[in-house]
Amino acid sequence: MGEDGVGSIYFQGTDPIENRQVGGGQFIQLKDQEKVIVFFVTPMEKLVSVYEHFWQDPGSEESGKSYTCIREGCPMCQAGNKPRYVTMAVVYNIEEKKVQVLKMGIKFWKNQVEAFKAYGSANDRPYQIKRTGEGFNTSYHTISLEKSEMPKIEGEVPDLMELIKALSREELAAIVGGSRDNSGGGSQGNNELAPY
């Protein structure tokens, strides 16, 4: 488990969410008025939170990529790229019938953890997540649906700790310096509801 302090790159459970200040952020692929219904596969105590950079090479037409911040001596921080605090969970998308990773900012998770605690579990019912608005005027509304059993999950469930593995200081410095393409390491762009 990560420690909350300088040098930490990840945190696990709900305490880092409940004790974190709510800041801005836009972390989802749903478009305005789109919604998804998911079961949370990850239990509350296994949610993974991390500081993450979004890096796009200057002048590039590509959408950029997300990289886990290594905190102390991070080349992306030194380049002025402020990391954002995101939390991830494995979910089962009911409509698409597949396992995915949900990555959202602290404001979403503060509300979601309250719902989990009210029901005593993150995994006993599906939740509808709907996006409204665009840009800085985006918000997400979650509705807990009737308690039911999670569908049987076939196939491999992603390891969140594997997904947040940080690149080395040297690899991050090479990205900042432009000597490495954006094809390896880190998580993909802004894929907050990313297929595994």
Image: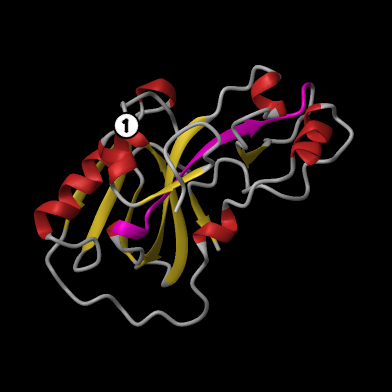
As drawn, 73 above or below 154: above
Residue at the spot 19% in from the left edge and 62% down from the top edge: 121
Determine whether 1 is above or below 43 in the image.
above
Position of residue 192 measured from the top left corner of the image (x, y, whole percent): 48, 46
Q: Position of residue 61 (x, y in %)?
A: 76, 30
* Residue at the disc numbered 1: 20
Horizontal side of residue 3 vs 21, given as left or right: right
Q: Quadrant of the C terminus?
A: bottom right
Q: Nearer the viewer, residue 103 or 67?
A: 67
> Where's residue 85, x and y in %?
45, 34
The amino acid sitting under disc 1 is Arg
In this picture, residue 78 sits left or right of residue 31: right
Tell me the residue at 62%/37% (across/down).
70
> The magenta stretch spans which residues?
45-58
Q: Residues within 10 Å of mark 1 (few under 14, many from 20)?
A: few
Q: Secondary structure at mark 1?
A: loop
From the viewer's perspective, is 174 left or right of 87?
A: right
Asked whether 47 falls inside the magenta stretch, the response is yes
Between residue 130 and residue 172, name the one nearer to us.
172
- Rendered-image quadrant of the N terminus: bottom left
